[in-house]
Image (spheres, rainbow, N blue to C red):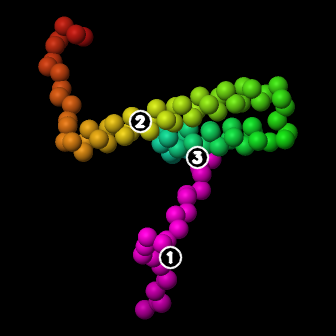
Amino acid sequence: MPPRKKSHLSVATADTPVVPAAPMSVFDAAESGSRMEELRAVRAVLAKAIDSEDTSPRDLAALTRRQLEVSREIEALRRQEKEEAEEASKGGVAKDEQWRPEAI
């Protein structure tokens, strides 16, 4: 029988440091990630461009404005997810409306 591979998993304790996951690329987030991952990836790219010394002052205003817009979208999505989670935890299920053929 071949030797067993050592697992990289371990038990987390209260003292275990939290290591954030590496951010996804915009392409990867757009292809396989959630809307939140896509927005975070775009925000990271914008932040790098804003902080770069190579960014022209002419482009800085537009980049900053777009970065603020993406941040607002992230916050709106977080609120929506939080509200949906709260609704689900209450056991609330949206009732279907009655079928009305004339609505078509």
Mark 3, mark 1: which one is toward the viewer?
A: 1
Q: Looking at the picture, how far across and down is residue 29, in whole percent?
A: 56, 44
Q: Tell me the residue that label 1 is attached to.
A: 8
Among numbered discs 3 and 2, the one appearing first in the sequence = 3
Q: Is residue 57 left or right of residue 50?
A: right
User: Does label 1 or label 2 sit earlier along the sequence?
Assistant: 1
The C terminus sits in image quarter = top left
Amino acid type for the residue under numbered disc 3: Asp
Callout 2: 10 Å neighbours few (<14), some, many (20+)? few
Q: Secondary structure at mark 2?
A: helix
- For marks 3 and 1, the one nearer the N-term is 1
Residue at image position (47%, 79%) is 7
Decide: is 80 above or below 103.
below
- Label 3, on which residue? 28
Q: Return the mark for residue 83.
A: none
Query: What's the magenta region?
Result: 1-26
Say which residue appears at 71% left-offset and 30% top-offset. 63
The residue carrying pointer 3 sits among few (fewer than 14), some (14 to 19) or many (20 or more) residues within 10 Å by Cα, namely: few
What residue would you read off at disc 2? Answer: 79
| Res. 10 in view | yes
Alpha-carbon span between mark 3 and mark 1: 25 Å
Between the C-alphas of marks 3 and 2, the distance is: 24 Å
